[in-house]
Amino acid sequence: QVQLVESGGGLVQPGGSLRLSCTCSTGIFRFYFMGWYRQAPGKQRELVASIAAGGSTNYGDSVKGRFTISRDYAENMVYLQMNSLEAEDTAIYYCNALHAVNGDVVAYWGQGTQVTVSS
C-alpha cells in the first residue's frame, strides 16, 4: 500500500517562504509522474508543479519563478520550495504520484497540508 504524507505547511507572511515535503512509503522511482496540487476554498484543485521520471518539470503559470519542485530518490521524498508567497497561494497542498500498472494509471494522493499566507 502506497502512502504519501505531506508536511511543512503552516502560516507565513506574504513574501515569506515554506518548504513542503512529501514522504512516500515506497520507492518513488516507480512513479512516472509526481506532482503537487493545491485547492483553495471554493476553487478546483489545480496543478502547482510536477516532475516526471526523466526529470523534466512543469509549473503552473501563477507559481513560475517562485516555486521549485525537487525529489530525493534515496529518501523517497518530493519537495516543493515556495518563495515569495502571496495571499493567493493559500490552499491545501496535496502530493500526487502516478504509477502505470498493466496499462492502467493508478493515482495516489496524500492527505494534504494547509498553507496560509497572511499578515
Image: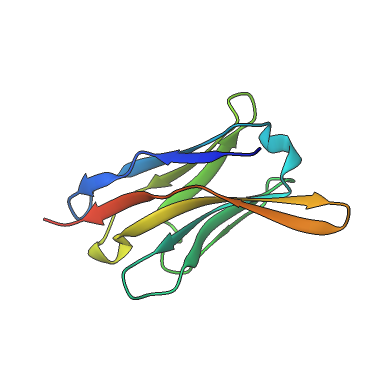
Drawn side of residue 16 relative to residue 23, left or right: left
Point 87% across, 58% down: residue: 103
Quadrant in the picture for residue 89: bottom left
Residue 54 in the image, given as x and y percentages of width and height: 74, 46
Point 48% across, 67% down: residue: 46
Q: How is the image coloured?
A: rainbow
Drawn side of residue 29 relative to residue 63, left or right: right
Residue 95 in the image, given as x and y percentages of width and height: 51, 49
Drawn side of residue 111 relative to residue 33, left or right: left
Q: Quadrant of the C terminus?
A: bottom left
The reply to whether residue 84 is in sight is no
Residue 80 in the image, given as x and y percentages of width and height: 45, 45
Residue 26 in the image, given as x and y percentages of width and height: 66, 31
The reply to whether residue 15 is in sight is yes
56 vs 6, nearest the viewer: 6
Drawn side of residue 102 relative to residue 54, left or right: right
**In the image as oriented, which residue stretches furthest toward the left?**
119
80 vs 94, nearest the viewer: 94
Q: Number of labelled discs?
A: 0
Q: Quadrant of the N terminus?
A: top right
**In the image as oriented, which residue stretches furthest toward the right?**
102
